[in-house]
Amino acid sequence: MPEKAFSFVYDEYGNTKKIKVYARGLEVQGHNYTNKGTSFTEKERQGLKLSGLVPPTVRSMQSQVKNNLQIFENKINDIEKFIYVRSLFDRNATLAHALFASDIERFMGIIYTPTVGLACRHYSSMFRKANGLHFYPGNIDQAEDILQNYGHRDIRVAVVTDNQGILGIGDQGAGGIAICLGKLMLYTQGAGIAPWHCLPVSLDVGTDNQELLNDDNYLGWRHERLSGEAYVKFVQRFAKAFRTVYPNALCQWEDFSKQNAFAIRDAYLHDLISFNDDIQGTGAVTLAAILAAMKIKEEPLSDQVFLVHGAGAGGVGIAEQIETALLEQGLQEAEARALIYTLDSKGLVTTDRKLDPYKEKFAKDPATLPWFAEKQDASLHNVVIKGKVTVLIGTSGQANCFTEEIVRAVAANSARPVILPLSNPTSMAEAIPEDIYRWTDGHALVATGSPFPPVDSGGKKIRIGQCNNVFIFPGVGLGVLASGAREVLPSSFTAAAHAVAAMVSASDLKKGILFPPISDLRKVSRKVAHRVGLAAIKAGLSGLCVYSEYQHNNDSERLQALIDKMRWQPKYLPLEPV
């Protein structure tokens, strides 16, 4: 096999226009970026020495998608469907993405949550082909060399996990890389970032999951988790290598433990072009739901009182993003924080308790709360009533904790209460949408973290908007790349939230629906990218132009044109034999 089997040729906008192929015959079919299966043209078959290696009929991609959809349908369960589509991606990445794009709403549940959680659990036993990079103490000192091996792909986005906080199921060791694979597929589907520009990375610092350590089939580093200084040095070594090899690439931190998530995000705010989706993506998509609700309520954000039940990475990220939005509307920091309550398993988060550092920002001083005197005053029900909460957000993972009593208490504070039970999977939701509508006589504004079927309310069928980070992170990534932003700021996520809220149709707002349908993902990501890019320009962080030029409409038009021309479509590229 030639030293280099193929190379990408880009146009002036960075989009791939063709692939130069040095390999021949089976080697061309053996790589998922050059393989077209039965869709190789006659010219390609002759030039790449494929004649006789594929059946005579040249199938269209549309026909290939139809055929693969039939095979997919015949799989007996979701994990078998996951294995099939992952194997298809490993054979033919373009066809796999064309299949996903044919019904993204349906395939999202397979390539990402909830099925990807099962894939994480069974990663070692299901292993078929390596994808992405696995760093562990035995190779972290060669990080630059290992990353450099992917340089021919012009890596633009990496999703990086230490595998500890996977989808609410905890430490999954080496299996956590399946999350990165899923997220990057959604970057491609939403933002149009070609799969060869995407890099999944596992920081395998060991596992404290004894079941994995005892499993003879386990493929990860068989060692208890690094912690303390050893852990910090490991992450630092990776970050330094990533910055050296890919200084212009976006690094998305994914599924770290709560404390590590905040510490790592904050440590590399200025050293890497990076963000944490569990914190900032969750914050932005929840803010989008709230902004859409404000359009329906016709009330300003500053007139609301917010309660986040569940003070983990996602919950505190939501509180941070609400605060950022309030500050942008002119409130002072103390005024904004006065409107935000956070609760954890012990009740209201207050300054008189010993707290993890990431919880301290939104802890309430009991002395400032006239109604807070005893421990029982910290209960969810009491805070809703005494705090006059109008927006109730659940990230607790406690099924059914938004009881009828709690929901009715929020409804007593607002004619259109906003109730967002965001914990997933569905079985862990804080309340069921049908119940919330019934308890509030159809007046509540509801979105959920997991998919729920439409609800009959007031003689109308109401689609339940899904508060899904996929509406945020692909567009943020594309906006950052298109604008040449050197940092990802809190204002980037406020811009993203406004963009998502703007994509909810007037007819859906009239019905009380807070999100566009998942099928609009590509359109939503385009809008998010544009708003995020403009926010970077306004902040002076963009390499595209200087802030003074932002006053001219042509800047916005230039950015939109660049975004549109950067986006890859799942269509076969010309293969040029070399």
Image (spheres, rainbow, N blue to C red):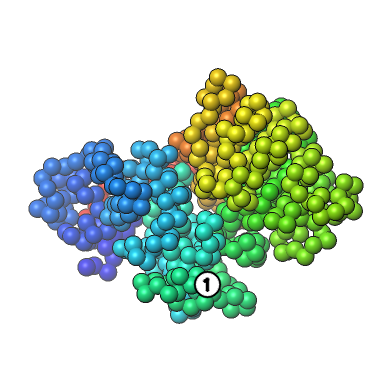
Q: Residue at x 62, y 37 (%)?
A: 289
24 relative to 76 in the view: left or right: left
Q: Is residue 506 above or below residue 70?
A: above
Task: Tell me: residue 416, above or below residue 80.
Answer: above
The x and y percentages for residue 440 are 67, 29
Residue at 46%, 52% in the rendered image: 183
Residue under the image location 39 percent in, 43 percent down? 107
Q: Amino acid at mark 1?
A: Asp
Q: Secondary structure at mark 1?
A: loop
Residue 295 vs residue 55: left or right?
A: right
The C terminus lies in quadrant: bottom left
Residue 352, how many percent across, how many down? 83, 61
Residue 59, x across and y down, in percent:
19, 41
Which residue does the numbered mark 1 point to in the structure image?
208
Q: How many marks?
A: 1
Q: 418 and 519: which one is in front? A: 418
Q: Is residue 47 visible?
A: yes
Q: Where is residue 234 drawn, in percent x and y?
A: 55, 75
* Left or right side of 373 for 253: left
Q: Quadrant of residue 296?
A: top right
Task: From the viewer's side, name the closer residue of 384 and 68.
Answer: 384
The foreground one among 130 and 106 is 106
Quarter occupied by the N terminus: bottom left
Identified at 46% across, 49% down, the residue is: 113
Camera-nearest residue between 120 and 325 = 120
Disc 1 crowd, CA 10 A, few/some/many (<14, 14-19, 20+): some
Whether residue 557 is visible to the viewer of this picture, yes or no, is no
